[in-house]
Structures are given as structure tokens and as C-alpha cells.
Amino acid sequence: MDPGTLDFLLRAEALKDRPRRGWLRAGVARPESVADHAWGVALLAALLAPEGVDRARAVELAVLHDACEAATGDLVPGEYASREEKLARERAGLLAMLEGAPDAARSRVLGAFDEMARDETPEARFVHEIDKLEMALQARRYQERGVPAAALESYRATARRGVASPALREALDALTSGP
């Protein structure tokens, strides 16, 4: 393995140690890491990709969709003025992480980031929806662990706003009708 790829991988491994800060705000003790979340989104992509969505590409986007957070941290609303500012900070962080990586690796990772940022492909739109669905799934897990429902309602509301496709909406309804 070339040194640039190894450096990127070591930097990306920091996602395992980065707690999802929104859950900290909700009072969750020992919240999931960014890597835990990315794994959950990738699992949903593998299991729920509908016809017309390239499952392999969706899984790849899910795995990479928050890689930049190893450099930027898990940015939460209020820490950026606009979506454009957030994307610019994330892209700059990703570029720093990829410094020294071969062109093929840089192209693949940045291509995934840009595809998600543009939200123009069926795969990107699907991954954005399952990103919200995974958040609702995690909220349910936290509620089952004793986190008060009121502390989790804003996350469920965000998921409801972000999930539009009928099949995923049905899954979301099943998740949010639980305990």
C-alpha cells in the first residue's frame, strides 16, 4: 500500500473515536461514533436499495458519506451558517486527509463526496434518505435504552422531513410507531 493511501486510512479510522455530537446534545451517554453511523447507513443501503438504484454505488456512498468528519468533526446545526459553508469546510477537510494519496484514490473519494453534495443521482438521493432513516433507527435504540422520547423527538422530526420515498417512509413509520 502506498504511503498516501495508508495516511488517508489512518486518518479516516479516527471516525471510530468521534461520537455523533447531536446525540450528546440530546443527553445520550456513550453515543454511537460517526463510523457506527456510517456502518448503519451502509447496512441499510445493502438491504433496502430499490430497483433503479445501483446497490454497490449506494453502499460505497454510505461508507464514504461522512469520511470528511475525521478532519472536520461532526458538524451540527449552529456551527455553520449555510449548507454551502458546511460543504466547503467538509471538502477542505477531505482534501487535507487525501493529501499525498494517489490520484485514483483522491478521485474516488472526492467523487463520492461531490456526488452526495450535488444530490443529483438516484444513489445520492437514496443515501440521503437512509441517512435520516438510520438516525430514526438509532433514536429508537436510544429510547429502548431509557433516553426520554422528548429528547429524541427533534431527530424523528428531522427524519420525517428527510424521508420521502414510499417504501422508506413505511419503514420510518414502523420505526417511529414503536415504544
Image (cartoon, rainbow, N blue to C red):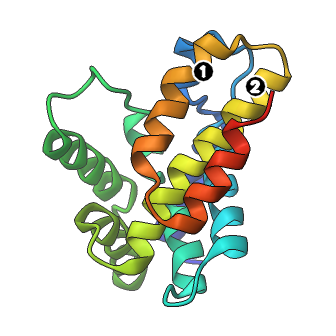
Q: Residue at x 51, y 47 (%)?
A: 132
Q: Residues within 10 Å of mark 1 (few under 14, many from 20)?
A: many
Q: Which residue is mark 2?
A: 142
Q: Amino acid at mark 2?
A: Tyr
Q: Residue at x 74, y 20 (%)?
A: 30
Q: Residues within 10 Å of mark 2 (few under 14, many from 20)?
A: many
Front residue (pair 110, 65): 65
Q: Residue at x 38, y 62 (%)?
A: 98
What is the spatial separation of the Cα atoms under label 2 and label 1, in whole angstroms? 8 Å
Q: Secondary structure at mark 2?
A: helix
The answer to which quarter of the image holds residue 31 is: top right
x and y percentages locating residue 26 in the rendered image: 57, 14
Tag 1 or tag 2, which sits nearer the N-term?
2
Q: From the viewer's perspective, is residue 11 above or below residue 122?
A: above
The total of numbered circles placed on residues is 2
Q: Amino acid at mark 1?
A: Leu
Q: Quadrant of the N terminus?
A: bottom right
x and y percentages locating residue 112 in the rendered image: 38, 72
Q: Which residue is mark 1?
A: 152
Q: Residue at x 58, y 61 (%)?
A: 168
Q: From the viewer's perspective, is residue 72 above or below residue 123?
A: above
Circle 2/circle 1 CB separation < 8 Å: yes
Q: Is residue 72 left or right of residue 167?
A: left
Q: Secondary structure at mark 1?
A: helix
x and y percentages locating residue 91 in the rendered image: 26, 54
x and y percentages locating residue 118 in the rendered image: 23, 67
Front residue (pair 101, 79): 79
Front residue (pair 138, 177): 177
